[in-house]
Image (tube, grey):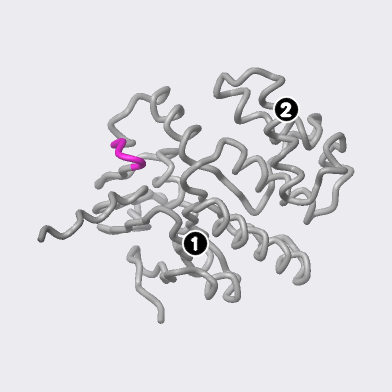
Amino acid sequence: MKSETPPEPILKALGLSKHYMQGDQRLRVLEDLDLSLGRGEKVAIVGVSGSGKSTLLHLLAALDKPDAGSVMLAGHAMHSLSQKEAGRVRNQHLGFVYQQHHLLPEFTALENVALPLRIGGVARTQAMAAATTMLERVQLGARTSHLPGELSGGERQRVAIARALVTSPTCVLADEPTGNLDEGTAEGIQELMLELSAELALAFIVATHNTQLATQMDRCYRLHNGKLEPMT
């Protein structure tokens, strides 16, 4: 009897290396780093400030180019694609949540959430309907017409999560998603992310200082000296 072939990872990095020059010094950030993420799997990456967590997320999203190595996203070799092609794959398969929500201040919550769909070519009526549904899902159905400046920090982060999920991505990259929130608000955002991950079979990679959030992931790594070290 043949064994079943394991499913292809939704995101796979092999041999990622990245260095930066600081004056005449060459600073190693990532060195021959491997990471594989299955559909619906949740991975936390912890590390001190400056350890390279954000750099790793940027490489995984092909927002930056590695010095060596490769990234496969949903079967696409990201760094071999043109900028336009990589953008299309990102829009289809990745969602992003940052410590700073990066909402457009002149757009309402609804318009901010609909933006990725509009960029992807979805008709305005359809994009607005999908954005409305997603804002309701993150318990902001009554705040759709509010500007970011009229929302609390936790509400703005919920809008950012809704925006990340509105395209129905297979993977979400979250960079310190609770870093700017008070403890109670952070716990609410954490619970929301875990709930949506389970409900929508979303893969998550979360770079965080929040140990409580990290322990809720399926796997946890420490980024140290350019390598990922499994944490138990």
**Relative side of 18 to 132, left or right:** left
Q: Residue furthest bottom?
A: 232
Which residue is located at x 43 percent, y 60 percent? 41
In which image quadrant can residue 150 be found? Answer: top right
Give the foreground label among 1 and 2: 2
Where's residue 77, x and y in %? 28, 37
Give amino acid for label 2: Met
Q: Is residue 160 magenta?
A: no
Q: Nearer the viewer, residue 116 or 138?
A: 138
Give amino acid for label 1: Gly
- Crowd tier of the residue under label 2, counting other residues whose Cα lies within 10 Å: few below 14, some 14–19, many 20 or above: many
As helix, strand or loop, the secondary structure at mark 2 comes to helix
Q: Nearer the viewer, residue 77 or 55?
A: 77
Q: Nearer the viewer, residue 228 or 52?
A: 228
Q: Nearer the viewer, residue 207 or 171?
A: 171
- Identify the residue position indicated by label 2 in the image: 128
- Magenta region, main secondary structure: strand
Where's residue 71, x and y in %? 31, 44
- Residue 171, compared with residue 109, is above or below; it is below
Q: Is residue 76 magenta?
A: yes
Look at the image and give the residue range highlighted in magenta: 73-77
CB atoms of marks 1 and 2 within 8 Å: no
Which residue is located at x 45 percent, y 38 percent? 63
> Between marks 1 and 2, how big is the CA–CA gap?
38 Å
- Crowd tier of the residue under label 1, counting other residues whose Cα lies within 10 Å: few below 14, some 14–19, many 20 or above: few
**Relative side of 222 to 117, left or right:** left
**Relative side of 151 to 120, left or right:** right
Where's residue 23, x and y in %? 40, 49
- Identify the residue position indicated by label 1 in the image: 50
Which badge, 1 or 2, is on the more N-terminal residue? 1
As helix, strand or loop, the secondary structure at mark 1 comes to loop
